[in-house]
Image (tube, grey):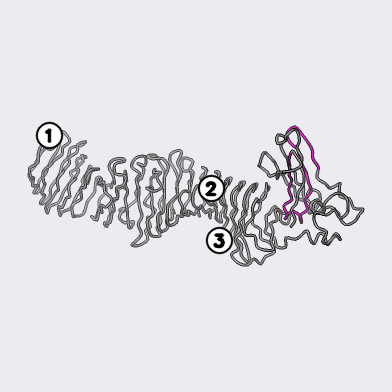
């Protein structure tokens, strides 16, 4: 065949029609824009010298095949090509389109033994050609200009090379369009290009097998590294967060997405950002540190669920929506923070400290279930539990449980039929619920149920009435002083006193107060029967306008010792900072509210 050669030519120096009939066109010496209309018949070979680029700006037509030769230069097609034959890339790169033009492939199959790059700026290009060979496929050549571009692969593809999205998005309807063999899908140019892979299971659910791995670095949750559009889709391959554009966003916009492969990182400061605006997501694989610590951000309105045995040691930030921990991630020791408006729930185990700030929700279970923690839990928002006729949700705090200023929200799924529902257990309890809603009629909250460091919703809240009857003062009332010892009956109920007769005197059981350089320490006895009424200390610098002493508020420290004085009588120690005194005065007192 004939050879047409361009050597050290200027841009656009040839615009006359060219027909390549079993012929070759060679470029060497400089980059070149060829404005000619090119017709191919038979086999037309384009030989572009290494490190050079030949751009065909007009359509390639004809019945022949187009071959990119063995040199590693770049051939770029920016016209609306209609040639009928096969496209073969023997080496180097074939680029379709540019960031300012809408090039196309020809109509035939593609044999890719180099690199095929799709670089169009629009959102509607569908590559229906079958792609085979040992080469790679790239979406987007630059960074930033084609952020909103979207390419869809629909062919029966068997190419074995990697897939790279530099900018814009790649949409797939099935796994086979990514080719065959072990490979990576690279979504790492996140700073400017925001590379995206979208799974659209409208025509059938998609399972990406474990021979396809992912390298990601793209943080935008609305243009995520991996996005689920429709279908109940599964990603079985490992996801490695790497360099390029920061952390990695995975979002659902419809359907469900299950990340069965692991999520890890091979560089520092990487977080899995799990978000979306529709559908739901699950990570059933393991989130681990890889070669560097990993953290998790839960964003967006959708619910994400962890079912694996996660071991990452970075922090977890639940800033929006719901995160359900249903797996055993006791080895994931980082702090979990729940922001206002967000919810943390599930039936698994959390390894780190849990800090739920005001406006947040801790909701154990998925329906009825238990959420456990290895570390301490602080709830300043809402503790939401469900109960039915048999059981209830439960929070099992491995360390301390702080409830100061929190709200208990009870939802009865059915008529309660048990005498008690344990809703929490703890190592050390600080504070009580400031607000309680939805409590079933006839039930109250016991903060140390059965002296077992448990919070329970207990049937039969009127322990005070039977106490009066037992002590022979039935109907006297909690404000009365039946034995004339100067102690109201309600306080005697708390401290374990005897109000039964005129000669009884319980003054020796009254609270005590001591003073040191930092604190006024107020100590009182608390019977188990009175614990359900939540007796508490108050303080103030005048004998009016008292302030409730709550652990963690204004520097107050509260400690409880079960059965300290005797079986069924606890010791409660309340340390109130002396700095709260006004005019060198600080008073304390014991209070119980009995309806």
Q: Position of residue 442 (x, y in %)?
A: 69, 63
Is 385 colored magenta in this rendering? no
Q: Residue at x 18, y 52 (%)?
A: 106
- Secondary element type, mark 3: loop
Q: Residue at x 62, y 59 (%)?
A: 438
Q: Residue 245 sits in which quadrant?
A: top left
Sequence-wise, which precedes: disc 3 or disc 2? 2
Sequence-wise, which precedes: disc 1 or disc 3? 1
Tell me if 321 is positioned left or right of 200 in this view.
Answer: right
Nearer to us in this view, 531 or 70: 531
Tell me if 546 is positioned left or right of 484 in this view.
Answer: left
Label 1 Cα neighbours within 10 Å, binned few <14 / some 14-19 / many ≥20 = some
Location of mark 3 (residue): 367
Label 3 Cα neighbours within 10 Å, binned few <14 / some 14-19 / many ≥20 = some
From the image, state whether disc 2 or disc 1 is nearer to you. Answer: 2
Location of mark 1 (residue): 9
Q: Position of residue 568 (x, y in %)?
A: 78, 54
Query: In whole angstroms, how far apart are the C-alphas of marks 2 and 1?
Result: 65 Å
State whether residue 94 appears in this view: no
- The segment highlighted magenta reads 512-540
- Secondary element type, mark 2: loop
Query: In whole angstroms, how far apart are the C-alphas of marks 3 and 2?
Result: 22 Å
Q: Residue at x 19, y 36 (%)?
A: 52
Is 529 colored magenta in this rendering? yes
Q: Are marks 2 and 1 in contact (CB under 8 Å)?
A: no
Tell me if 446 is positioned left or right of 106 in this view.
Answer: right
From the image, state whether disc 1 or disc 3 is nearer to you. Answer: 3
Location of mark 2 (residue): 340
- Secondary element type, mark 1: loop
Q: Are marks 1 and 3 in contact (CB under 8 Å)?
A: no
């Amino acid at each position: 065949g004939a050879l047409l050669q361009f050597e050290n030519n200027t841009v656009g120096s040839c615009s006359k029609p060219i027909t390549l009939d079993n012929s070759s066109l060679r470029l060497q010496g400089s980059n070149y824009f060829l404005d000619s209309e090119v017709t191919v018949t038979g086999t037309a070979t384009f030989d572009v010298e290494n490190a050079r680029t030949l751009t065909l700006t007009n359509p390639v037509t004809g019945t022949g095949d187009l071959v990119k030769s063995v040199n590693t230069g770049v051939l770029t097609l920016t016209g609306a090509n209609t040639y009928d034959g096969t496209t073969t890339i023997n080496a180097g790169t074939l680029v379709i389109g540019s960031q300012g033009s809408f090039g196309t492939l020809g109509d035939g199959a593609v044999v890719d033994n180099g690199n095929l790059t799709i670089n169009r700026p629009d959102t509607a290009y569908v590559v229906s050609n079958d792609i085979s060979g040992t080469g790679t496929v790239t979406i987007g050549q630059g960074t930033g200009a084609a952020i909103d571009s979207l390419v869809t692969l629909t062919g029966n593809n068997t190419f074995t090379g990697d897939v790279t999205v530099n900018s814009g998005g790649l949409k797939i309807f099935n796994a086979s369009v990514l080719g065959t063999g072990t490979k990576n899908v690279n979504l790492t140019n996140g700073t400017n290009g925001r590379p995206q892979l979208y799974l659209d299971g409208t025509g059938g659910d998609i399972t990406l097998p474990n021979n396809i791995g992912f390298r990601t670095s793209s943080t935008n949750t609305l243009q995520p590294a991996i996005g689920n559009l429709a279908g109940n889709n599964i990603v079985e391959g490992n996801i490695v967060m790497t360099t390029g554009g920061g952390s990695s966003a995975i979002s659902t916009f419809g359907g469900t997405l299950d990340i069965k492969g692991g999520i890890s990182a091979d560089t520092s400061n990487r977080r899995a950002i799990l978000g979306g605006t529709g559908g739901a997501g699950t990570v059933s694989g393991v989130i681990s540190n890889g070669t560097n610590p990993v953290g998790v951000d839960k964003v967006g309105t959708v619910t994400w669920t962890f079912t694996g045995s996660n071991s990452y040691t970075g922090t977890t930030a639940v800033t929006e929506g719901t995160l359900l921990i249903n797996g055993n991630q006791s080895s994931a020791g980082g702090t979990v923070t729940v922001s206002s408006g967000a919810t943390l729930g599930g039936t698994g185990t959390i390894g780190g400290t849990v800090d739920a700030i005001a406006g947040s929700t801790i909701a154990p279970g998925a329906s009825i279930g238990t959420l456990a923690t290895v570390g301490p839990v602080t709830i300043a928002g809402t503790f939401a539990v469900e109960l039915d006729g048999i059981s209830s949700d439960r929070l099992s705090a491995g360390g301390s449980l702080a409830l100061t200023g929190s709200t208990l929200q009870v939802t009865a799924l059915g008529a309660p039929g048990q005498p008690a529902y344990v809703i929490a257990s703890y190592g050390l309890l600080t504070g009580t619920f400031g607000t309680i809603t939805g409590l079933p009629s006839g039930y109250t909250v016991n903060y140390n149920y059965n002296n077992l460091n448990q919070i329970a919703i207990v049937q039969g809240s009127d322990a005070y009435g039977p106490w009066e009857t037992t002590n022979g003062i039935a109907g006297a009332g909690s404000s009365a002083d039946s034995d004339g010892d100067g102690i109201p009956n309600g306080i005697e109920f708390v401290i374990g006193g005897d109000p039964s007769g005129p000669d009884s005197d319980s003054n020796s059981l009254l609270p005590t107060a001591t003073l040191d350089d930092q604190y006024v320490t107020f100590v009182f006895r608390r019977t188990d029967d009175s614990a359900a009424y939540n007796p508490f200390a108050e303080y103030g610098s005048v004998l009016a306008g008292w302030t409730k002493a709550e652990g963690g508020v204004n520097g107050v420290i509260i400690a409880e010792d079960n059965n300290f004085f005797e079986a069924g009588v606890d010791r409660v120690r309340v340390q109130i900072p002396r700095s709260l005194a006004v005019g060198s005065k600080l008073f304390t007192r014991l209070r119980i509210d009995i309806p």
